[in-house]
Image: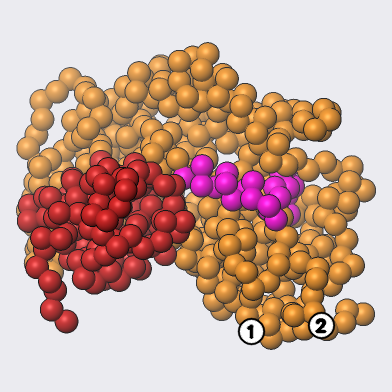
Chain colours: A red, B orange
Amino acid sequence: MTYVIAEPCVDVKDRSCIEQCPVDCIYEGGRALYINPDECIECGACEPACPMEAIYYDADLPEEYAGATASNREFFTITLAGRSAALGNPGGAKRVGVVDADTAVVTAAPVRAE
Amino acid sequence: MISHVSSNQLAAPLRVGIVGAGPAGLFAADAFLTQSEVPVEVDLIERLPAPFGLVRYGVAPDHPTIKSVVSTFEAILLSSGARLVGGVDVGSSIGAGELRECYDVVVYATGAATDRRLGIDGEDLPGSVSATEVVSWYNGHPDALAQVLTAGSVAVIGAGNVALDIARLLVSPYDRLAQTDIPTATLPAFARSAVRDVQLIARRGPAEAKFSTKELRELALVDGVSVTAPAADVAGVDAIGLDRRAAANLRVFESWTEPVAGRGRTVSFRFFERPVAIHGENRVTGLEVQRTRPGGQSERLVRPVEMVVRAIGYRGVPIAGVPFESSGGVVPNAAGRVVGLDGRLVAGVYVTGWLKRGPSGVIGTNKQCAHETVASILTDCHTGAVVRAPDRPRLTDVLQRRRLAASDARGWRAIDEEERRRGAAEGRGRSKISDWATLRELAHRTELQPT
């Protein structure tokens, strides 16, 4: 169990959650942000910070965002497009910076109109 | 006289004393150490030999995932430019005024160490305790008094996560608790516990409760525990317009409205019940409440319980020589700059965390709070409101003249290692050390050895 970032984040990336996270476990992809499930300490600070209400405790995810849990995990476990290895658990998003890639779920999400 | 020098001329680092090495203080230290505008030297002055404040002494022992934030805190503590000054009480070891002399900037981050009271008859009867007393006891705080769990029925007053923690710990099977870091000497009290049922008493309804959904749900996941919520109160909530958390909580309560036949321990939610008195001659025998449904009749009834725990919020504790607003239990401030009773800023004195904004939010909330305070300090360095003096006395020298020895991060390391060693001997990750003598002995042991 962990907090996860669901589809309302796609193409928004407000980043307010990043400032709240005490362990810096929210990573920035090309179109969305992702929570590293192994680094998340489940404190819940990020959830109310998101203006898009994109963050859920995974047990509370609405059915329409059911793919978010796997998607957040895959961002770290799968070798993303254009990269030579999986991100793994880097121990902090700051040292990684922006990763210009996304998971299949986020890539397939419709482009959000302005 | 202190001469005014502009920031770009300065070679000497800004000397910062942060009082309190809990989440608020550590995030403030981190905010100082990760900026590059002003070179800093940060002392974290902590009353106890062990750092981490409420992460160590407040977060429930069965929540190891949240406690794992400690590894982030340890990294902050060990970063160059930071130093732990442990076992030093601002107030008795050194006054606030004297402390101010030692640093260019003092940041108070002592949190909210005491509890709010109910202000009702019988509150001081044996068997009536505060959440702080119970939580600090099972978390091994060296100042905590031993508690006894001889009550069969317990009322926990409050509708927040602290009330949930206490209810969950009180109904947990012994085997579950024996895996946590609860001090070895404290575990037998849980093994002998007489607790059969816990009633969670809330003044308002299911939609107003401040429980986080994840922790609410967790209650029913404890082995052998049945949870019930009054069907009429839950059904009476208008679900339209509820915020996301309240709506999610309501769904959890709805799943608990069926009475459960079980032989195990029970947790029962009681809504719209305002405590009016605690009954008993020599010990607690009951909690009298005024029950008022919205739009309904009001009635008084007595819940027969032998223990009452009030978990209605924390309160900051005033520090002699530092302005305090007793109504809110906070230090009056403007973006972290301490404001005196005359409405003027107190030069060089700042506040962060619960002592600044009141006891709300989660661990991570303190990070942003600390960033605001540190941003104010950096601004004040540039405007000249903060004056760097090169000839300040060193806190450790001042303490030494009083024959007070502070401990450091190595002292904490020694405590940490001994707790892990004791835990491993019992087949668990850690057994906390909860007595002052052993904590002090371990914290100072490293001084005897060359490093």
Figure quadrant of the C terminus of chain A: bottom left
Dots 1 and 2 on the same chain: yes
For disc 1, the marked residue is B343
Give the amino acid at mark 2. Answer: Val
Tell whether B137 sits left or right of B249: right
Magenta includes A110?
no
Q: Is residue B82 above or below residue B225?
A: below
Q: Position of residue B14 (x, y in %)?
A: 74, 68
Magenta includes B79?
yes
Give the amino acid at mark 1. Answer: Gly
Q: Position of residue A25 (x, y in %)?
A: 38, 52
Q: Position of residue B341 (x, y in %)?
A: 66, 79
For disc 2, the marked residue is B5
Q: Which residue is depicted at the point 14% across and 55% down?
A: A105
Foreground: disc 1 or disc 2: 2
Region in magenta: B69-90
User: In terms of secondary structure, where does tag 1 sit?
Assistant: loop
Neighbours of disc 1 within 10 Å: few (<14), some (14-19), many (20+)? few
Q: Is residue B402 above or below residue B268?
A: below
The picture quadrant where one finds residue B352 is: bottom right
Q: Along the line of sight, which residue is nearer the eye, B303 or B148?
A: B148
Query: Which badge, 1 or 2, comes first in the chain's sequence?
Result: 2
Q: Position of residue B64 (x, y in %)?
A: 41, 35
